């Protein structure tokens, strides 16, 4: 059963519905105890980095989510950005989970902000999440900030004022900047891949 992190915000219902379409059992988890025993964890995200980190801290979830010995993890949209060391989304830099070496910055001037709509994926390296997902697959984005991190952690990019990470990976942690639950067949395939690898105990 996948544990869907409930920190009082985010697109929980739409992710639940998408996983339900795949026959994946889901439970909401708002405490460390509710995360225990889950073969996979999904951190959805809609909102801003500061309030999200405050909510995770208040629920004492930081240790569980940042523990390298934990189960496979998938961060969605803001959930990907929270893997970084810091985010510029606030009056002061926000300290995030610190899993990935990098920083979250706002898209520069001269481009549409937020970046909302369909955009295609450019695959950079093999990853269990990308099994059966072809180059150029369209997925749905809605964000004003993007992660900047070393390319060795990037499995796929998309382009808006230049390429930015669309899928990242470090060990058990993976993140997608787009919303797979709103991304049609490609998004459902990615969620199915996540569940399959979780069942196998693979780092997905």
Image (cartoon, rainbow, N blue to C red):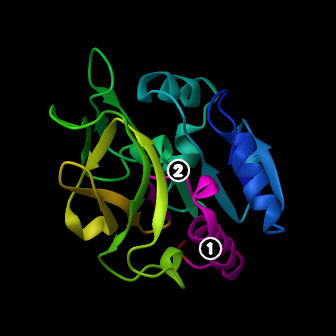
Between 17 and 60, the one lying in front of the other is 17
Q: Quadrant of the C terminus?
A: bottom right
* Quarter of the figure that contains the N terminus: bottom right
Residue at the disc numbered 1:
189
Relative to residue 88, is residue 45 drawn left or right?
A: right
User: What residue lies at 78% left-to-right and 52% top-to-bottom?
Assistant: 17
Is residue 81 toward the left or the right of residue 160 in the image?
A: right
Are the residues at dot 2 and dot 1 in contact (C-beta closer than 8 Å)? no
Of residues 112 and 13, the one nearer the viewer is 112
Q: Which residue position is annotated with label 2?
A: 76
**Image check: 57 left or right of 102?**
right
User: Badge 1 local density, few (<14 within 10 Å), some, or many (20+)?
Assistant: some
Q: Is residue 1 visible?
A: no
Could you tell whether 51 is left or right of 25 in the image? left
Q: Secondary structure under badge 2?
A: strand
x, y percentage for residue 186?
56, 70
Residue 152: x and y, percent? 24, 70
Seen at 82% across and 59% down, the residue is 20
Distance from the alpha carbon under mark 2 to that under mark 1: 15 Å
Q: Which residues are magenta?
A: 173-202
Within the image, what quadrant is residue 81 found in? top left
- Residue 188 falls inside the magenta stretch: yes
Q: Which quadrant of the structure image shows residue 146?
A: top left
In this picture, is 139 found above or below 97?
A: below
Residue drawn at (53%, 50%), measured in percent from left and top? 76
Q: Position of residue 54 (x, y in %)?
A: 51, 23
Question: Residue 23's spot in the image, x, y percent?
Answer: 84, 68
Circle on res. 146 = none
Main SS, magenta residues: helix
Q: Secondary structure at mark 1?
A: helix
């Amino acid at each position: 059963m996948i544990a869907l992190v409930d920190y009082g915000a985010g697109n929980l219902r739409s992710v639940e519905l998408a996983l339900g379409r795949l026959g994946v059992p889901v439970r909401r988890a708002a405490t460390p105890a509710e995360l225990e025993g889950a073969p996979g964890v999904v951190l959805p995200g809609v909102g801003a980095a500061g309030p999200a980190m405050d909510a995770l801290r208040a629920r004492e979830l930081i240790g569980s989510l940042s523990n390298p010995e934990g189960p496979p993890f998938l961060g969605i949209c803001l959930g990907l950005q929270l893997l970084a060391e810091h985010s510029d989304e606030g009056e002061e830099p926000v300290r995030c989970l610190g899993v990935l070496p990098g920083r979250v910055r706002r898209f520069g001037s001269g481009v549409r902000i937020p970046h909302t709509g369909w955009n295609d994926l450019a695959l950079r390296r093999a990853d269990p999440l990308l099994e059966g997902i072809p180059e150029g697959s369209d997925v749905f984005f809605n964000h004003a900030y993007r992660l900047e991190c070393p390319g060795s952690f990037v499995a796929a990019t998309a382009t808006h004022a230049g390429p930015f990470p669309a899928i990242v990976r470090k060990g058990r942690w993976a993140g997608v900047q787009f919303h797979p639950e709103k991304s049609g067949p490609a998004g459902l395939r990615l969620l199915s891949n996540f569940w399959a690898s979780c069942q196998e105990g693979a780092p997905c």
